[in-house]
Each structure stands twice: as C-alpha cells, then as structure tokens.
Amino acid sequence: MNVMVTDPVQQGADDGRISDEVILKVDNISLSFGGVKAIQNVSFDVKRGEVRAIIGPNGAGKTSMLNCINGFYHPQQGTITYKGTARKQMKPHIAATQGIARTFQNVALFRGMSTLDNIMSGRTLKMKANLFWQMLRTGPAENEEIEHRKFVEKIIDFLEIQDIRRTPVGRLPYGLQKRVELGRALTMEPTLLLLDEPMAGMNLEEKRDMSRFIIDANEQLGTTVALIEHDMGVVMDLSDRVLVLDHGQMIADGTPDEVQANQAVIDAYLGVAHE
Amino acid sequence: MSEAQTSRPLEADFDTIPKLLLRNAKRFADRPACRVKDLGIWQTFTWSEVRDQVRDLSIGLHSLGIERGQTIAIAGDNLPRLYWTFTATQALGAIPVPVYQDSVADEMAYVLEHAGVTVAVVENQEQVDKLLSISDQVPLLQHIVYSDPRGLVKYDHTHLHSYEALQKLGAEQAAANAQLDDWWLGEINATTGDDTSVMLYTSGTTGRPKGVILSGTNFVRTAANANRFDKLNETDEIIAYLPMAWVGDHIFSYAQAFEAGFCVACPESPSTAVSDRREIGPTFFFAPPRLFEAQLTDIQVRMQDAGWFKRMMFDNCLKIAKRCGEKILEGRFVNPYDRLMYFFGNILVYGPLRNQLGFSRLRVGYTAGEAIGPEIFSFYRSLGINLKQLYGQTEASVYVTMQPDGEIYPDTVGKPAPEVEIEIADNGEVMFRSPGVFKEYYKNPEGTAETKTPDGWVHSGDAGFIDGRGHLVIIDRAKDVGKLNDGSVFAPKYIENKLKFYPEIGEAVVVGDGRDYAGAMINIDMNSVSSWAERNNVIYASYQELADHPEVYEMIRRRIVEMNVDLAKEDRMKGSQIKRFLVLHKELDADDGELTRTLKIRRAFVADRYGPFIESLYDGSARAQISTEMTFEDGRKGIIEGDVRVEDVSAPANVPVQEAAE
Amino acid sequence: MELLHQIFIGPFIEMAGAPDLLVQVVWEGFVSGILYALIALGFVLIFKASGIFNFAQGIMVVFGALSLVGLHELGVPAWLAVILCIGIMFVLAVTVERVVLRPLVNQPEIILFMATIGLNTFLIGFGETVFGGEPKTMITAELGLPTGVTDVQMLGGMVSFQHIDIAAAVIAALMVATLAIFFNKSKIGRALRAVADDHQAAMSVGITLQQIWVIVWFAAGIVALVTGIMWGARSDVSFALEIVALKALPVLILGGFTSIPGAIIGGLIIGISEKLAEFYWGPMVGGSIESWVPFFVALIFLWFRPQGLFGEKIIERI
Amino acid sequence: MFYREVGDLKTTYRSDQQVLTITQERYAIFALLAFMYAVVPFIADDFWLNTVIIPALIFSLAALGLNILVGYAGLISLGTGGFMGVGAYACYKLTTIFPDVNIVFHILASGFFAAAVGVLFGLPSLRIKGFYLAVATLASQFFLEWAFGRIAWLYNYNDSGAIDAVNRSLGGFALTEPYGDTKFQYLVTLTIVVFLTLIAINILRGRFGRSWMAIRDMDIAAELIGIRLLPSKLLAFAISSYYCGVAGAMLVFLSLGSAEVESFDILNASFPVLFMVIIGGLGSIIGSFLGAGFIVVLPIIISTVPRFFEIDINSATVEHFRFMIVGALIIFFLIVEPAGLARLWQITREKLRLWPFPN
C-alpha cells in the first residue's frame, strides 16, 4: 500500500498567492440562541489563498461566525457556500473532511496526550488502515503510521516545537499550546484554516512567532486563512481583507487601510478599544 | 582489545579525503558514516550512501562552474550536508573554506573576499541574508546554495539554489551520463595529498584572520596517527557540535572519521546538543575545559536538591572514587576493599552519572585549549571516564602533543604525538615539526615566514618546557612570558591558573616582568567565599566588604603559600613565587573592559587602570588607592575608586615547608 | 402477529378488564416510587451542594435501618434508638467529610465517584461486621407506625391499602415539605442553594465549604434513615436491599441530578411503570423484570429528551 | 539507577514508535515473559496458580477491557460484569452446541457476543455523557443479570441454574477446570492474556486509540478534526466488551469451573473490575495489571493474616472484614495517589531514569 504524503513545505509556492476563486461565500446568514441574536444578516466571502480577518468588539459574533462555517452551529437563515456547494446544515466532521480546520479561542487540545499525538490526531481523517491491521500493527497500519509521522514531523519542524514532542500538552505553557493547536490544524492539510484569536494572551515575542507561522502557512503551504484577532496591529499586518462585526452585524468590509479609515469602525470598535 | 580495535598500518594510497571516501564506500559500505537528528529521528547514512550523495553534489557544484583550485565557503551548524560539501568540493580539486557561522557580516565579508570565494554553501535563511547583505563587498561570489528552504521560497533564485535541487540536478546528470561517474573518479585521483585540502581561517586575537592552507596529506597523516594512537576504528562514534570552521572539528569529526571510518553524529540544534549526546553516546569526544567545568557545577547544583540519604551516598561514592577511581581506570594496583567499594559505587553513582552525561560508551575524551582544573580533570577520570589532554594548533592540523594512556598528569599536555618533533627555543617558545604542518598562510608570505622556518619548524607562539617525564608543560603565550630582574622566567598565566584552581580564588592578575619578584592581585570567588562566610558567621554587605575581611586575606595568603610551595618544586618556575598580594575591591568584569568576552584578562588594560595597586605591590606600602574615571559600555561615566590593603606573603618558601594538607 | 398482540394489546385489555387490580398495582408502584424518590432525594441533596455522585446513598438507607434495628436488639428503647441513629448519621457525615471528601477536594469527579463506591463497600462490610449479616425485621410497632390494612371497595373489586404504605406517603410528603422550607427559608438552606451555583458566594454567607458538606451529608443521612425505616417496614432489613436501592439511579437520570421535583416525579414514574411492567408484562418472560425495566424506561425517555425532565436545553459553547 | 540510555538511538520511525522505546525495558519485558513461561510453572504450586495468578491474569484482561472504555475513551461503565457474563454464557453455549470445535477458539469467539451486546448498550453514549452514561450502563448490567437467571436456555435448563465448565481439551490434554492440569490452564491463560494485551496495545497506539483519547479529552475538538463520535464510541464499547467477554469465558472455563448469575453481578464483577482500573490507573495498560493483581491478592492477604497469627475467625466475619478493608483501602488509595499504581510506577521509573539526580 502506498500512502501519498506530500511535503508540506514544498508545495504551492507561487507568487500569485491569492486567486479569484471564492472558496467560501457566506450569504446573508442569521443565527440566534433563544432570543439572543448572535449574527444578523451577515454576508462576506473568502478567496482562495488570502488571509481574511474578522474583527469586532467582544460579543460581536465573531466566534459564532466561525462556528457556523465549520458546522458547529446551524444558522437559522442564509446559506454558506463552500467550494461551490451551498449547504444549510453540516456536521463538524464533514466540514473537516472537506478541508476546514480550526483552532479555538481557549485552547482545545487533548490534554492527556503528547504534542506528537495531538498533532498526529490531525491526520485521523487521512488514515485508512482497518482494525485488523491496526491490531497487528504491521503492513498497512505500520506503513501508514510512519508515512503520516513523517508529515507530522515536518509540521513539528515547521513550528519549531521539536523539543516538546513527547511532552503532554497539559504541561506546556499557554503560548506553546496555541502553537501545538495550530500544528494539529495544519496537519489536516486544510484548504481553509479558521483561527480563533490565535494570539490571545501571548507576549510580544510569541505573537511575532505566531504571525510568522501564519504567514508561512499561508505563503508556503498555500493555506487560506480566516482569523479572528483582537490585536489591531497584527490584523493590519497579516490580513488581505478585514470584515468588521459589531453586535452581530457587519459594519465594514475591505482592505486593512479601508477599514481603518471607516468611520463606523472607528466609532464601534476602535472607540471602544481606546476607552 | 578485539581484533577490530588493533591498529591498521598507514595506507599510502589514500592520501586525500575523497580517496578515503571511495575506500570507505567499499570497505565499510553498509556501516553508518553519519547521522543527523532531524524530524525526530537520527537520519543515518552509510558510507556508500554518502559516496553517492557526495558525487551528486560534486556534479551539481561543477554545474555551477566550480573548477579545480576555486574556493567554496561553507557556513552553518554541523550538518552532514555541509560535511559532504567539504568532500564534494575536495573531489573536484577545489578548496572548501569553512566560515564561523556566528561571525558578523563584516568578518564574513573579509574572509570571503580574501579567499576569493565564488560559491557559498550555507545552512539557512540567516546565512543567506548575511551573504546578500555583503554581496557588494564580495564581487567574486556568484552563487549561494542553501540547505534549509524555510523562508527562502520567495527569494530571487537566479543566484540562489537549494541544496536539494542542486544535488538532484547532479544525480540526474549522473544518471543520464554514465561517464560522469568516471569523470568524477578521475577528478579525485587527479588530486594528490600535496594539493590544498582545506583553508581554515584562524580567528586571531589581533589583526585580521589568517587563512591557513592545509593539504590532504596534512590531515590524512595526522588523523591516521591520532587514530592509531587511541586505537580508533570504524566502530567508534563522535558527536559533531563544535564550529565546522575550527580545525579541531575538521580533524575530529571529519578527517579522523574518514580515516578510521567511524560515524559522525550531528545534533538537531545547538540547544539540544546535550540530550543528543546522551542518545548517541559518543565513544570519542572533545570539549573545552569550560564545558567540563560547567557540567561539574551542574551536577553539584542538581545534587543539592537531593534528599539527605542520596546526597550522603553520592558524597561517599565520590570520596571512594577520588581515592581509587583513577588508579582503577589506569589499571594500577588498588586494594581489594577499595576495589569492592568502587564496584558498588559504579552501580550506584558512577555508572548512572556517566549515563546522565552521555559518557557511558566513551573510550577516549580530550580537552584542550586552556588549562583544566586538576580537581575537575580528576573528577571525570575517577568516574571511569578516560579524559585526556592534548596540545594542538591549526598550523599543525591540531595534534602536537597528546597524553598516552597510563601517563595522565593534570598539569601537562602530554608527549609529542606520533611523527611530531618538539623543541624548546631559547626564549622558551615551543617549536614543532610534523607531517601535519601547514603549507602556508594564504596570500601572506610574511606571515608564513614569521611562523614557519624553511626547514619546516613552526613557532607555536606558546612558551613551555619539557618536564622530567618527557611531557610538555605549556606555561603561557610566549609574548606574555617575561623575566624577573634576576633573569628567571616569569609566566603570569601559568601562575594565575595555579591560583585560580583554588576554589576561593576567582581571578588573579600576577605581575612581575622586569621586577624583583612576582606580586598578585586577587579576586575572591564569591560563591565559594560567601558560603564559607555563611558557615563561619562572617557578616558582610558587599563583595568589597568581604574581600577586605582579615580572615579572607588570611585564607588567600594560605593558598598563595601553598602555591609557592608547589612552585618551589619546579626548577624553571621557583623564582616566580609571589611575595606580596592584594585582594581587589571589585570583580574584574568584561563589561568594564577588564576581561575579554571570553573572560581572558586584558593585561595591558588592567595594568593601566590598576597602576597604583601594582606599584603598591613593590613599594612596600600597606594600603593603596585608585580613583579612575571610566566610561561604561552604555555611555555612562563613572569613577572607579578603590582602597585596598597590601600584604606580604609571610613565609618565603624557597624551601618546601610542609606538604599542604588537602 | 399473535406475539405482537400479546405484547402490545393484551396487557391493556387485561387492565381495562380489571380496573380494581390496576388501581392496586398503581398504588403499589406509587409507594415504591415514593421510596425511590426519597433515595434519589438524598442523592440530589449531595450532588447539588458538592457535585459528588454519591453512589453510597442506597447503602446509607440500609445502614440507617440496620443501625436502628440493631440498637433495638441490644435493648435500646425505640425512641432512643431513633435519636441515636440520627447521631450515627451525623457522625457518618462528619467522618465522610473529614476522611473522604476533604483530602479529595479538587480531584476529578470520577475520583470522588469512586470514593463513594469505596464508601459503599466499606459500609456494607462495617454494617455486617457490627450487626451481623442475617436479615432483620423492622421494629414497626415499637416506632408507632401503623400496620393494618384498609380494603376499599371500588371499581367492582377490592383494593387494599397497607397503612404503612399510607404512612410512608404521608411521611415522605412531610419530609419533602420540611426540606423545601429548610432550603427556602433558613439561612443555612439559602447558603446551600448558593453553593450549588457558586462556591464563593456560599463562603461569603459565612459558612465554610466543609460545614456545608457535613450539613448536606447529614441531611442526606436523615433522609436515608427515614427511607430505611419505611422500607424496612415493608420488607426485611438486610443488605439485599442495596440492589433495590440502586433503582433510585434511573430516577436520577430521569429527573436530573440536581432537581428535587425531578427526583419526586421521576420516582413516581419509575415506581409505577416498574410495577405495571412487572405485573402485566413480566409473566410473559418469566418475571422479575422490575430489576431492569426502570433503567430502560429512563433510557427511552432520555433518548427523546436528553436534558431530563426538568433540565434546560444545553447550548454547548466552544 | 539501572537505566543506561546512552547510545539508545532511533534511526527509523519504526523503532521510534515501538511499544517500549528503551532497549533495556524491552529486554526486561522479554525476561519477565520468559520468567512467566519457564519459571513460574515450576515454582508456583497449584494453590498460588488457582487462587492468585490465574484469576489475576484473567481479571487483568477484564480490567484492560474496562480501561479501554473508561481510561482511554472516557466513557464510564458499571456494566462490566454483564459483559463478562455474556462471554461466559456464550462460551458455554458454543461449546455445548459445537463440542468438536476447540475450546480456546470458543473462548476467543465468545468475546464477539459480548462485543455485540456492548455495542447495543453503547448506543445511548451518543446522547448522554458522564454519570448519566454510567447509570445507563447499569441498564445492561441488570438486564443481563436478569437474562442469565431467567432465560433457562442460556444455562441449558440445568437444575442448578448455573453453568458448569464441560470437559474440553487442548492438544490432547484436558484443559478446562476442574478436569485439566492447573499448570496447563495457567500457560493457556497466560498466552491468551499476552496475545490480547499486545493487540490492545497496538490498537491504542494507532489511530483508534488516538481518536478515543481525543474524544475523552475534548469531544468537540475531536469532532472538528474529523473524528466521528458515534462509530468511535461504539468501537470502544465493542473492543472493551470483547475483552471483558473473553475474560468472563476464561473465568468460568479456566479458573472457577462453574458460574451462576452472582459471579457476574455488580458487587462481584463490575465493582471489583472498576476498582482495578481506578487503583491501577486510568488510561494505563500496566495499571490494569497492577490493579488486578492488587485487588485479587488483597482478600487473600486479609483472610491469611488472621490465620497466620492463629486467630480463629469464622469465614463470614472474614468476608465482612474483607469488604470493610477493601472499601477503606480504595478510599485510602484514591487519597494517596488518585492516578493509581501506574502513576507510582511511572514516578519510580522517572526517578530511576534520572538517578542519581533527584529531578
């Protein structure tokens, strides 16, 4: 059995990074819990290859938006079109099979497992050896495990976390946990990577590292990124386009410069942030 | 000794490293040639694989226009790929020039320009950026080859090549054209041992670095001799972690490895070198004294956290080891009781400790470069680690003297290595001649003439003497050695080192050139003396206060007497016994310009700043003051004030008084 | 076809055919349900206040009853035995808090759960060592509990009501009322309710967490003692009761771990459904199905309403 | 202290991913196995084999099975006894229906029946979690107990209502209790346990094991990396129940010789096995063995100690004491080391690896 594993660091390195293909289109969606309206009539799109930021004050509905995209919440109205297929309801694991990976605001690692196992678990979908071979751990099971380990090691190398390979993630400092979580998402070889506040609670140096990893993932691995972030500096540096939400409604959408100049944004977001 | 460990005769046919590669690819085809910790495992290459890797790279480099006689720069941490670049370059008859990977852009520019480098093979983006920043200063440099593509994908690749692509290109060409392999073999055979093998730039303390040209024979002969001397063969293993631009690494991890056919392991990164060493378990190892020193301190610190029982066991075992460990290592007679105790100690402490340090499999370890504290040296040896000293120089392809098994003395650097002749010049300078002696300094005939006599003797620049046992003792840099007014030799560093081996003494400056006698300015070792103070309820507020304490003075005086007694036993040195001393009011500090960054004393600077103190050592005054304005590194100005007592060393020790008890 | 008829139609025809019997069966179920509800109630008290799944609640029932009978056998008058048993329950609560809960504070809940299983095992051994392993008879008369039977003519037949069962229902109702007043009116009760939501809040009322634990375990102990008396009066007192006590567990998944009304309603549902099942369907498969029917009832119920009877729909947040 | 890891380097992922990466430990395990096979049969008498070693091995297997469910997949189960019973009764039926098929085959096959029942009762795990699930597993326990007692076909309409191991042999030698030789039973038990343990280790370190642990640690994140919860949980139930089932069959045919409902009830089977898992250590294979050994040996020690001091106590009292002491010890253990014996072993191992350094 031959498992094809591509080299994550070699593929996709063209300079025409962003294509015109709209990989994700969110059309007029609304979501509410009981009486609380989390998202109201929001529409935006993500193009293949770009870094798309979603910003907004607390409670703006950013995380809910990501939850809708990867199928954890189901919006009451509107459609989400991903890779040309519109859908209303989708189970999270289906989103995963279609190439949507995700990190969480509060690190959602598997605390009892090592860094290596956490990242290996990102390959679950790509592993096929059946229970019989798994029991004997020879043949396809072993080969597959080795092939995927090679891939995972490249991600570990990419994120520079070699020395914590065997450490249970529960014992790692917060910044490293976030990095491992990014690693787990990247090993899924996602087409679309959703990052929920990847730099929350980090110091300046950790933020710089994380920014570098996100840029590298975008440029070298060709991953489309949609991220939520509070640090405006980071958002302006990283992203190609920025969507601004406030109280579940979209108040601006455009390039970082446009958004920064937008009066509604300044009032709603920056005003709040500078208080 | 098993059959594999008996020495082989020298093989005249293989007089260059590429020829040794071809030999090893046949003789040790499936034995590991090198390993590198990468992607979580030790990626291992056999000699026959290395041959193919090197050939492909050679052909790839050739396609970049590399011809016989050209120079190629190599910069990066120890990596098999960079070692292969050495061989691939040498196979073409071109000359590799390794550059210190941490040198700043300017230093690198100088070397590359001086050596006329046309192609540089480097590790990663950091080095590429450095080279690009100096590209206008190095007009000859045409191509840069990088090993790690990270961050470089978006760079302009007209003159930039990935190692992988270059090697693949070579492989494709070789596959397409069967004659290319023959051509390559022909190139190797066309190179003789007399041709230049490598050019190493010595990081001189003064002036610009000099390019030392060394031939294939230099390395192959020296390596062969060293391998025979310590019976190293293809079953051995070394970990390569010292800078590739340093001659030591070039001989230990490259020439000797190729000559004996042993395996070279490269750590994952400098920060994991220690744990990687544990995994590899080198059988042959080199480290500078400060590494052994730091490691010993680390052991002591970690053991302080142990429970009382474990600490007691540890201390007792070390006592036993101190008593008989070295004797057992050297196969000398030890009474059965001690032998039994050592056996238990080996189970409880020495064995586990060797395991922790990664020395369980070590057969030979060397240290050199500076004097190693006898306590430290003995500590390792008493654990059963065969640590030895050598004396070497770039100009000699390293080996000048080595300590033979069974003749280990902490204060000597051993006997002349095989095929090495040694003489002591009239001014005390050590001169040597050997097959490893360099050809010349590159583009520097004056320098060559100054260092190397027409009949092949090299001025080492170090002063030393041969002791009664036929061992070389290095006392100081020749230019620092002076004379007392009575004409006897005065070697300050030699005496300072002796003083520094006492735990209470942190640093010492000894003066005496052109004076009647030697005097010393002492820095106490804060760790050691403060813990003494704690134990003896001596109260102090600062270093200055502690240094001035009468009991501290008394303690230092006792140590100096002890050393004087020691010196009195050495014919050449007994004139240099210290007659007066003072304890400095502050610690000498690199930040204040008193030490170099490598913590060596800047003698002239100290002599200038502490002039009044030095005078007081000779004018008989009981106190001395200084007050100097100085500029700190950050631009602040301050006044250094000091007021210290000067004391006589009471017992003049021409006659050995009594053996100072340990 | 006949089988389906036998399962899905037959029993109902039977019920309709003899309504007096049906009432009798439902009444039996009602009384068992009350007792299940009481066990579940003790459980809920502890879970609400400390988040501990107290597996030993059932054994505390048996232990309480056994202590009472055991003390009486030793010649202690009934009224004094009851007081002593209350004391024993208090000592038990303090001991559990000191020896088990305090050292295990901040451990994962499964560890505390395991500890209560350990406690369960210990109490079985302890009770049997002290009072012996043989089944005993409850001192119903000495406690002044009624023993007679009232037969009521209705629906074309006779339905008998054991006085002890009526007493059980009344006492249970009183007990729930007392607890409700205690929780809603008293200061300690309010603190206990606070602790269920927020430990900090409880401590600001001036009661330590340790005290709260002792109080809830004591309260659960008294509930267990009362349950034990009622139950013991209906059958023998022995550790075989423990298995029956486990039937409080489906009540819990039905009613929710934290809901007192849930425990009561759940108890009644379980009690009545198990008796109906046993009486009308049991004979088809050899009887004794009341050992597992409650669990299946609860499971089927959960399948359609995972949040339980009184639980709110949970929105998972990530 | 005894560890010498220098030079223990891994040059392939295959060697880096083996079960025991430290060469010395691999040798130690081989030595232990050699000891178990070649030495134990000669030094242990029948009493030891019958009352300690064989039951400990069998219960280790059950504990391992339960540990897969509780420790690795994070699904609490109180129904172990029922699943063991399914294995035992299935094996009994199989060997009476197909007497010519080898008993070892039947033992291994009976696990599949347990697995099927396990999957059925694992279905609620999709909708309910934690303690609610624990209570739900009691449904299977009580239903199965009822079935073993009331469905006479299961025990071949015996008057006793119990199942008795029938005389079956392996390779020409009588194997089943009470007909077979104890040493022979021991060797067969050991072989089955070793074989199934290896398989468990393999499954646990592969993608299924990782999926279970992922679900255990954070089910939402597990779902979002593409793990389907229900199939994974059901697989955990199936494999766990298989192990329990095989253990139950072995208990009857290789150890007890006969069994009735009580052998597999909550007090005699479910709880002890759960104790083994908790005291041994959740999510630890070695813990399953240590826990089983501990719980099996404990009552023997408790009943032996008074005899040792020549104190005459009747057996009922010993039984009561046993309950008390086991209960107290469990609480004690949870307080002293909630992570179980496996954690103690792990700490010791770390200490030995770091020796002579304290940390």
Image (cartoon, rainbow, N blue to C red):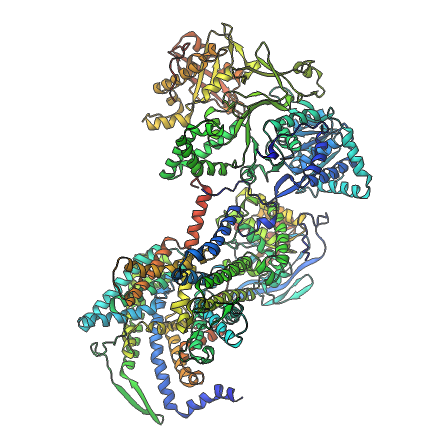
Residue furthest out toward the top = B486
The answer to whether residue D228 is left or right of residue B192 is left
The answer to whether residue B105 is left or right of residue C19 is right
* D186 versus B380 height, above or below: below
Along the viewing direction, whichever of B381 and B374 lies nearer the viewer: B381
Q: Position of residue C300 (x, y in %)?
A: 48, 75
Along the viewing direction, whichever of B613 and B366 lies nearer the viewer: B366
Counting every numbered tag in the picture gives 0
Quadrant including the C terminus of chain D = top left
Q: Position of residue D248 (x, y in %)?
A: 46, 68
Q: Position of residue B149 (x, y in %)?
A: 68, 42
Does residue A53 appear anywhere in the picture? no
The answer to whether residue C59 is left or right of residue B239 is left
* B576 versus B638 height, above or below: above
* B269 versus B515 height, above or below: below
Q: Quadrant of residue B549?
A: top left
Does residue D309 appear anywhere in the picture? yes
Along the viewing direction, whichever of B511 and B59 lies nearer the viewer: B59
Residue furthest out toward the bottom = C156
Q: Quadrant of residue A100?
A: bottom right
Q: Position of residue B60 (x, y in %)?
A: 76, 38
Quadrant including the N terminus of chain D = top left
